[in-house]
Image (tube, grey):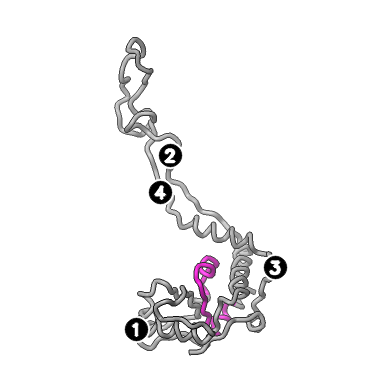
């Protein structure tokens, strides 16, 4: 299966605007930070001096022992006592507007295109659900673009298509260096996370509609 490097001219034919300036850099940062923050569970929690289960009895009398004053065993300065200023359950969610998300996606896609990291192919489908078949197809696509790669040293790859067959999903499930994503669901963080991106012709058209 042959592939070609996605160029600015080919992108424009799919109605994809390519950003060649610094515009959108902050949007990419904001979106990626928000996505990672939204994945945080926010369940970390510690007990304070008020909630730790210890006696409230005064350890020793206030004066006359020569020791420092101590009011309760749950004091944060004691082993087993409560924790001061520790984490408690909270939400780390960050909101980003649709306009910023679209700009970030367009900027990330543009950046990968300008560094020749996006390959365009007619389709991406595996007939048999074998990992070897999947790796061989990846190798063919990468080598047809001019890269001489061994099947055991393929770059991490994001494959974008409008849809995938069941056999294609099954053949790719054991390949941790590759990810199959639909053109409707792929996001900005994924565009930046892989060494190479393979886009089918039909998916490129869908991305053009999504980015416009």
Please name the residue shown 54% across and 57% down the image: 33
Secondary structure of residue under mark 1:
loop
* Residue at image coords 35%, 13%: 66
Q: Which mark is residue 43?
A: 4
Tell whether label 3 touches label 4 (CB within 8 Å): no
Query: Which image quarter holds the C terminus?
Result: bottom right
Give the structural element (helix, strand or loop) at label 4. Answer: loop
Q: Position of residue 155 (x, y in %)?
A: 46, 75
Decide whether residue 195 is among the magenta residues.
yes
Out of 23 and 100, give the one closest to the viewer: 23
> Around disc 2, counting alpha carbons within 10 Å, would you say few (fewer than 14), some (14 to 19), or many (20 or more)?
few
Q: Position of residue 107 (x, y in %)?
A: 62, 68
Identified at 42% across, 53% down, the residue is 41
Residue at image point 67% right, 83% down: 9
Cα–Cα span, label 3 and label 1: 43 Å
Q: Quadrant of residue 50?
A: top left
Q: CA distance from mark 2 to mark 3?
A: 43 Å
Q: Tell me the distance, in whole angstroms, between the alpha carbons under discs 4 and 3.
A: 40 Å
Residue 21: numbered disc: 3
Q: Which mark is on residue 86?
A: 2
Marks 1 and 4, Cα distance to the nearest angstrom? 39 Å
Secondary structure state at the residue bearing disc 2: loop
Residue range highlighted in magenta: 184-207
> Residue under circle 1?
129
Q: Are marks 2 and 3 in contact (CB under 8 Å)?
A: no
Q: Is residue 110 above or below residue 33?
A: below
State which mark lies toward you, 2 or 4. 2
Asked if the residues shown at circle 1 and circle 4 are in contact, with their CB atoms under 8 angstroms apart, the answer is no
């Amino acid at each position: 299966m042959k592939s070609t490097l996605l160029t600015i001219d080919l992108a424009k034919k799919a109605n994809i605007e390519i950003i060649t300036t610094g515009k959108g850099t902050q949007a990419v940062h904001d979106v990626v930070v928000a996505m990672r923050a939204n994945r945080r569970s926010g369940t970390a929690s510690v007990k304070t001096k008020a909630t730790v289960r210890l006696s409230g009895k005064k350890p020793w009398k206030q004066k006359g022992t020569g020791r420092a004053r101590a009011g309760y065993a749950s004091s944060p300065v004691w082993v087993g006592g409560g924790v001061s200023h520790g984490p408690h359950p909270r939400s780390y969610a960050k909101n980003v507007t649709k306009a910023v998300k679209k700009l970030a996606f367009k900027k990330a896609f543009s950046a990968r295109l300008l560094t020749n990291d996006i390959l365009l192919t007619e389709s991406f489908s595996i007939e048999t659900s074998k990992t070897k078949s999947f790796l061989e197809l990846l190798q063919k696509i990468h080598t047809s673009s001019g890269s001489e790669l061994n099947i055991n040293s393929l770059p991490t790859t994001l494959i974008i298509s409008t849809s995938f067959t069941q056999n294609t999903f099954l053949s790719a499930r054991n390949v941790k260096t590759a990810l199959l994503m639909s053109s409707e669901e792929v996001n900005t963080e994924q565009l930046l996370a892989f060494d190479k991106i393979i886009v089918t012709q039909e998916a490129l058209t869908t991305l053009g509609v999504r980015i416009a």
